[in-house]
Image (cartoon, rainbow, N blue to C red):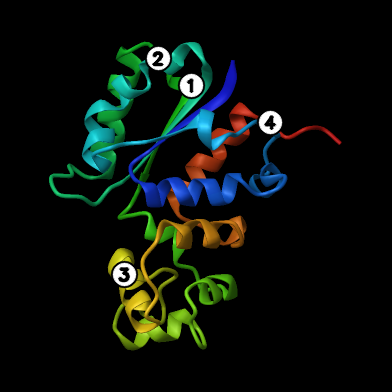
C-alpha cells in the first residue's frame, strides 16, 4: 500500500503540489513524519477542473482504495456554479465515504477563493520567480489588488495575472512549482493549507528524536 493519493483540479495545482512535495525532506517543513510521494503514482489531475473534482472525486478515487491508505482532494472554492467552500467539502466528503473511504483517511482541501491564495506571498522568492523589480506587494497595492493592511491580495488569480502582464512573463504551471519549491510553509496561514498540514501530521506523526 502507498501512503497517499492526491487528486487536484488542474495542472497549476498539480505543479504547486509537486513543487512542494518534491523538496528534499519536505516533511520537515510540514512538521510531520516522512511519507513517500511520486507524481506518477500518487497524483491525479482532473480533466474538467474543479467541477469534475466536486462531482466525481469519489469515482476517480474508487480504485485507489486498494492501493493507497489516505486521499487528499484539492480544488478551488471559486468557480462557475460553485456552492461555496463549506458545501463543497460536505458534498465531496459525503460521496467519498459512501463509496467506501473512511472519514479519518480523507482530507478535502477547498482553497478559498483559489489556489493563487497560496502562491502570492510577501516573499523575496515570489518576487524573484515572477521577475518583479522590487516587491510584489507594492506593485499590486498600486493596482488596488493588495490592500496595505491585508495579509493576502484580493482576487488572487487576477492579481497574479496582473503581475505576469506587468513583467511580460508567460503564464505557465512551472511558475507555481518554482514558487512552492522555495517559499516558507510557516508563512502560509491559509485555513485550507493549515487543515492539510494537520491531516498529514495526524496520518504521518513526526518521528521521535
Q: Is residue 128 left or right of residue 147?
A: right
Q: Which of marks 3 and 2 is nearer the N terminus?
A: 2
Image quadrant occupied by the C terminus = top right
How far across and down, in percent of the image, does residue 25 sit?
A: 72, 44
Mark 3 residue crowding within 10 angstroms, few (<14) / some (14–19) / many (20+): some
Image quadrant occupied by the N terminus = top right
Mark 2 residue crowding within 10 angstroms, few (<14) / some (14–19) / many (20+): few
Give the numbered dot on residue 205: 4
Q: Earlier in the sequence, mark 3 or mark 1?
A: 1
Q: Earlier in the sequence, mark 4 or mark 3?
A: 3
Q: In this view, does 101 lie to the left or right of 131?
A: left
Q: Name the residue under label 1.
A: 104
In three-dimensional space, the C-alpha distance between marks 1 and 2, rounded to whole angstroms, equals 18 Å
Q: Mark 3 points at which residue?
A: 154
Q: Name the residue under label 2.
A: 63
Residue beneath the point at 61% across and 57% down: 186
Q: Do the residues labelled 2 and 4 touch (CB within 8 Å)?
A: no
Q: Nearer the viewer, mark 2 or mark 4?
A: 2
How far across and down, in percent of the image, does residue 32 sit?
A: 67, 38
In three-dimensional space, the C-alpha distance between marks 3 and 1, rounded to whole angstroms, equals 33 Å
Q: Are marks 4 and 3 in contact (CB under 8 Å)?
A: no
Residue beneath the point at 59% across and 21% down: 2
Residue beneath the point at 29% across and 82% down: 144
In three-dimensional space, the C-alpha distance between marks 2 and 4, rounded to whole angstroms, equals 26 Å
Instruction: Identify the secondary structure beneath mark 2.
Output: helix
Above or below, 10 against 200 in this view is below
Residue 5 seen anywhere in this rendered image of the structure: yes
Above or below, 101 against 178 in this view is above
Amino acid at each position: 500500500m502507498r501512503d497517499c493519493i492526491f487528486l487536484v483540479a488542474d495542472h497549476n495545482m498539480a505543479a504547486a503540489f509537486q513543487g512542494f512535495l518534491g523538496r528534499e525532506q519536505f516533511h520537515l517543513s510540514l512538521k510531520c513524519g516522512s511519507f513517500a510521494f511520486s507524481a506518477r503514482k500518487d497524483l491525479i489531475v482532473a480533466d474538467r477542473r474543479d467541477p469534475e473534482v466536486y462531482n466525481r472525486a469519489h469515482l476517480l478515487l474508487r480504485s485507489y482504495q486498494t492501493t493507497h491508505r489516505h486521499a487528499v482532494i484539492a480544488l478551488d472554492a471559486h468557480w462557475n456554479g460553485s456552492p461555496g467552500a463549506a458545501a463543497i467539502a460536505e458534498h465531496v466528503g459525503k460521496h467519498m465515504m459512501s463509496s467506501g473511504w473512511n472519514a479519518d483517511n480523507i482530507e478535502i482541501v477547498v482553497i478559498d477563493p483559489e489556489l493563487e491564495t497560496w502562491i502570492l506571498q510577501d516573499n523575496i522568492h515570489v518576487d524573484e520567480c515572477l521577475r518583479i523589480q522590487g516587491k510584489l506587494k507594492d506593485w499590486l497595492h498600486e493596482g488596488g489588488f493588495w490592500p496595505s493592511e491585508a495579509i493576502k491580495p484580493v482576487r488572487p488569480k487576477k492579481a497574479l495575472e496582473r503581475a505576469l502582464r506587468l513583467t511580460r512573463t508567460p503564464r505557465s504551471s512551472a511558475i507555481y512549482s518554482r514558487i512552492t519549491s522555495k517559499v516558507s510553509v510557516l508563512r502560509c496561514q491559509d485555513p485550507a493549507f493549515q487543515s492539510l498540514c494537520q491531516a498529514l501530521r495526524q496520518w504521518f506523526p513526526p518521528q521521535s528524536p
